[in-house]
Amino acid sequence: MGDAAQADALELREVISRIDRQLAETRKFVAEHDKLAAEQAKLVAGQFKFGAEQSRLYADTAKLTRDRLLSPWQTALAFLGAGAALFAAGRAFLRVIG
């Protein structure tokens, strides 16, 4: 019986040792998973940042396109206003003289 008890004790130590190794491996995998999850969260935050930057650039592009399209009309209206002012000044000058 002594040999059987000793064999059972050795087998039990083997099982405990194997469980300890598996627990250590599981802890290692969990730590690696947590590290990768933190990295993923950081990348997602960067993605949102770049998405916001992209939206801002699209808005700037739309504004510049609108300004480029309206620029000739602004110039034409400025010349029209300047011509009207010169006409009014000439008419006032003729009233003063005449």
Image (cartoon, grey):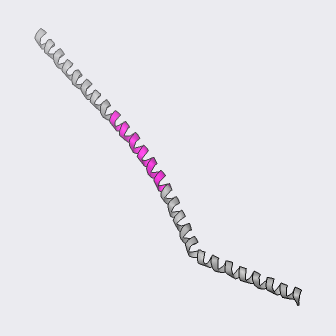
Q: Is residue 51 visible?
A: yes
Q: Quadrant of residue 68?
A: bottom right
Instruction: Describe residue 49's horizontal placement relative to residue 97 as left or right.
Output: left
Please report the bounds of the magenta region as a residue range. 30-52
Residue sticking out furthest to the top: 2
Q: Is residue 80 left or right of residue 52?
A: right
The location of residue 84, given as percent across then percent down, is 74, 83
Residue 42 position by quadrant: top left
How many numbered markers are drawn?
0
The image shows residue 30 at horizontal and vertical percentages of: 33, 34
| Left or right position of 55 against 38 | right
Residue 92 drawn at (x, y percent): 84, 84
Position of residue 90 measured from the top left corner of the image (x, y, whole percent): 80, 85
Which residue is pictured at 39% across the width and 42% down the height? 39
Residue 28 position (above or below residue 61): above
Relative to residue 74, is residue 63 depicted above or below?
above
Magenta segment's dominant SS is: helix
The C terminus - image quarter: bottom right
Judging depth in this view, the residue of 89 and 74 nearest the camera is 89
Q: Is residue 1 visible?
A: no
Q: Image quarter for residue 79?
A: bottom right
Closer to the camera in the image, 94 or 64 = 94
Q: Residue at x 26, y 24 (%)?
A: 20
Residue in view at x 80 percent, y 82 percent:
89
Q: Quadrant of the N terminus?
A: top left
Q: Say which residue appears at 36% left-offset and 40% top-offset.
A: 36
42 within the magenta span: yes
Q: Viewer-proximal residue, 14 or 24?
A: 24
- Give the residue at the far bottom of this rendering: 98
Above/below status of 77 relative to 23:
below
Q: Residue 68: within the magenta?
A: no
